[in-house]
Image: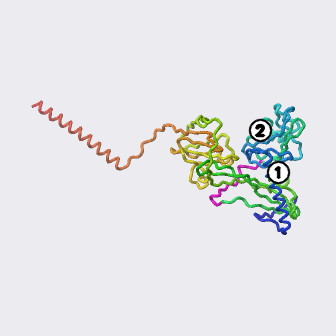
Amino acid sequence: MAMGTSVVHDQSPSRNPRDSDMMFMVRFAFFLVLFVSIISSGRADDNILQCPAFGPCRKAFLTSNPMSLKCGNQTGDAPITWQFLDARDPYTEAVTFISSSGPVNIIEGLNQGQQMTISSLVSRAQLTSGDLTILSPRVEDTGLYICKDGEKTLASYEVDFQDANCLHIFHSSLMQNGQLNTIIDLDEEGTLEMFTVWSEWQPCDRCRSPGERKRIGYCYAEVSKDAVILTGPVPCGLLRTSFKEVLTRPPELQIKICQEACVAKLPKQANLILTIEITNYHTLLHADASFTCPGSSIYRPVYWMHEGESTTRLKQMLKTTTYIMDDTTGGGTLSIHMLNKTEQGTFECYVERQLKARFNIIFPNVITEPETNSWHQYILMGVGAFLIASVFIEIALACYKTTQRVIH
């Protein structure tokens, strides 16, 4: 496919009003279908996808964060299997890589590169009641996923895993903006437009006090010509086979300040919050430390506290704190460089407003070298020495006089 090099940001090709109306209606229909599919799937989380009956689904996720695909209505008479077709090699056959009946032989019929890809996927995948979970997805996991009950197909998904290591992060309080739409001229083939499709805002990360909330923006693309959409809109990674290096737009993460008069969710056992053990972290002054909050991911609200003071992304971006929350999981990992005495104490992490872990930094008892004495300390030491010497002299004189009297 011949492609020009013209790239325009936040602009559209010249269209007459009727063409613009047509494009708007097509785009509106896409987002309406996307919304309906989300509602009909009954998802509880952004990282769980269940296709409606009229699937297949196309969906973008982020790497390094667990996600799940639902298998649908299962009969239970046959083992549940999942197949994978690599988006980078769409002309091969889908490969069965996991089964509810036990390990799958994935070597037969695959070249070395395919074996490595599938083996890596298997090592990070697990089945729960037939549903597929990928614990730490990678970009190379992008492709078609098919769930089967014996020979019957129950669900199919075209999934694009976008690189969380390349997130474009911006904070509304800093007047920062997201990426502009990008339009690439494909000469006679039309135009390729890349834009961001946003998830809903996550709940505020805490209740009754200022906090932060975030939402994820995924790269989507479409190809159009003369106001007619030829391809898409689809997640960008699903078009890389056709456009390769052209689709380099990263996903986004937007953060803003929030405050909700909500009530933090309590665990099912009311006393569970009291039974969370403290993990003691023995280390040295000026060493580095890193803590990961259990159950955290970019799809869930998460925040950290240290001795009653919270760490926020805004403080981090303003460089008013030495604590760094990672980008890839949306703050699930907290890193501290060059620990000092003020870091001694307990760090707490919260996921979906629930306390999940406590980490207690402990420094060893270090014998420090005496500090350099100042001038007034030298004066006091000199006066003390003079007084002690005077006492000894007085005692010596008294003893001498007593001796002289005895002799006479």
Relative side of 169 to 220, left or right: left
**Which residue sits at x=70%, y=58%?**
178
Q: Is residue 358 left or right of residue 139?
A: left
Amino acid beneath label 1: Leu
Which sits in the foreground, 209 or 56?
209
Q: Is residue 44 magenta?
A: no
Q: Quadrant of residue 250?
A: bottom right
Q: Looking at the picture, does residue 35 appear above or below residue 12?
A: above
Specify the amino acid type for callout 2: Ala
Give the secondary structure at mark 1.
helix
Disc ID at residue 320: none
User: Residue 6: percent from the left, percent from the top?
Assistant: 80, 64
Q: Which residues lie in the magenta part?
A: 161-175
Above or below, 129 against 374 in this view is above
Closer to the chain start, of discs 1 and 2, is 2
Closer to the camera in the image, 155 or 320: 155
Q: Quadrant of residue 297?
A: top right
Q: In what quadrant of the picture does the C terminus appear?
A: top left
SS assignment at label 2: strand
Is any part of residue 231 visible from this angle? yes
Quarter containing the N terminus:
bottom right
Residue that extends furthest to the left in the rendered view of this protein = 408
> Where's residue 271, x and y in %?
60, 35
Contact between marks 1 and 2 (CB within 8 A): the answer is: no
Q: Residue at (58%, 46%) from the top-left corner?
A: 337
* Pointer 1 residue: 238
Query: Residue at label 2?
Result: 125
Q: Position of residue 326 (x, y in %)?
A: 65, 48
Q: Is residue 172 magenta?
A: yes
- Pick whichever, 148 or 84, lies toward us: 148
